Image (cartoon, rainbow, N blue to C red):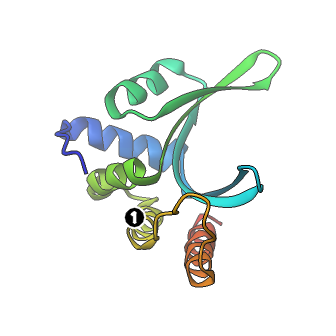
Amino acid sequence: MKTILYNSHDLAYLAGLLDGEGYVGIGARVSGKYKSRQLILQVRIGMTDSTVIQWVHKTFGGQIYEHKRLPNKTMWLWSITQQPAADLLAVINPYLKTKRTQAWLAQEYQAQRTPSTGGKLVPVEELVLREGFMLAIRNVNA
């Protein structure tokens, strides 16, 4: 893990954005030649104010996506995934209010999952572990 020192005000602001406008979860995506299902830790914030999303990206990394919701309304999405997401959740955890449980589960998921090994089948036990974390976070989000 790369050690980065953040301003505590920035961490608190990000936690507030995540609590109010964000998502912490494990998303499923299908990719690859064999259309295998991958479960990926995701942290996202969506807003119509691009300046805030650009600040989050500049300060904490990740990716920005543009999403057209209505003909004349654009939603800006910031996303960070996998280990960088877990690392960021660890440093903002003291400031989180409503997403604290999801953040803890997400960090545990990332810590306990066995990294994929390029094209080899993931053992059933590992799949069960991953699905269990995904469902646990989904239940908290409900």
- Which residue: 46% across, 70% down? 114
Q: How many marks?
A: 1
- Which residue: 77% across, 15% down? 72
Residue 70 vs residue 85: left or right? Answer: right
Quadrant in which the C terminus appears = bottom right
22 versus 111 height, above or below: above
111 versus 52 height, above or below: below
Judged from this view, the residue extending furthest toward the top is 72
Which residue in the protein does label 1 denote?
107
**Can you give x and y, in whole percent of width and height, for residue 54 in the image?**
45, 22
Among the 4 quarters of the image, the one containing residue 59: top left
Q: Nearer the viewer, residue 57 or 75?
A: 57
Q: Nearer the viewer, residue 26 or 71?
A: 26
User: Disc 1 on helix, strand or loop?
Assistant: helix
Residue 90 vs residue 69: left or right? Answer: left
**Can you give x and y, in whole percent of width and height, for residue 36 in the image?**
72, 59
- Which residue: 32% across, 52% down? 87
Judged from this view, the residue extending furthest toward the right is 71
Among the 4 quarters of the image, the one containing residue 135: bottom right
Q: Nearer the viewer, residue 40 or 5?
A: 40
**Can you give x and y, in whole percent of width and height, for residue 109 in the image?**
46, 69
Which amino acid is tagged 1?
Answer: Gln
User: Would you call the spot at circle 1 few (<14 residues within 10 Å), some (14-19), or many (20 or more)?
Assistant: many
